[in-house]
Image: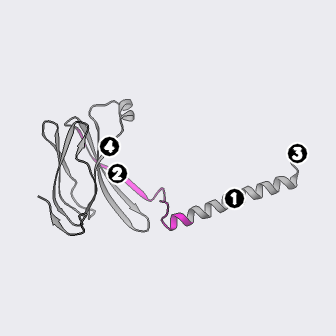
Amino acid sequence: MKFTGRSFKRALSFTLGGIALLAVAYVVLVFLAVIPWPYACISETKMKLPNVSGGDFEIIYTNCDTLAKEESISVHVSRAGASRVTKWLNKKTLLFQYDPGAWDAPLPSIRASGQGRVLISIPRVSSISVQSRNWANVSVDYEIGHIDYPVTGQSQQTP
């Protein structure tokens, strides 16, 4: 099959039109927040805590600006003392994620609280989205002073 100038222009026009249509659809879906804008979120490692009860902990602040502003603090853990290769194979696990409620809110403190136990403490959070109670053979305890918007929707003090 031989392409002529006319058929080539037609194929090129069809291809470019399809690409333009997909680009417009993508922009509309991002604008409607159906799909996220890939550069709308910025994450920053705030603290690293090596070898706490066998885990390397990392606290990450994430700020997303789409139609609404979202902030979160995440606590991740991976096996302590792993080399770069084994860290790559042994990915981080999300233990705790919450909305800090303010840009200047304090970060959580993380410490070993006994054999195979870790305590994550924070004086106040706006809301909690992830709260795991164990990782590997380690129990995770929480000491949260106040939750502004708990799951029930009412403000409460946590013992």
Mark identifier at residue 18: 1
> The residue tagged with tag 4: helix, strand or loop?
strand
- Relative vertical location of residue 49 with respect to residue 25 in this rendering, above or below: above
Dot 2 or dot 3: first in sequence order is 3
Identified at 16% across, 66% down, the residue is 156
The verdict on residue 45 being magenta is yes
Dot label at residue 44: 2
Say which residue label 3 marks.
Answer: 2
Q: What distance separates the C-alpha of mark 1 from that of mark 4? A: 40 Å
Q: Amino acid at mark 3?
A: Lys
Q: Position of residue 153 (x, y in %)?
A: 24, 69
| Foreground pick, 18 / 47 | 18
Which residue type carries mark 1?
A: Gly
Find numbered disc 3 in the image and state the secondary structure of the residue it sits on.
Answer: loop
**Element at label 2:** strand
Q: Residues within 10 Å of mark 3 (few under 14, many from 20)?
A: few
User: Contact (CB < 8 A) between labels 2 and 4?
Assistant: no
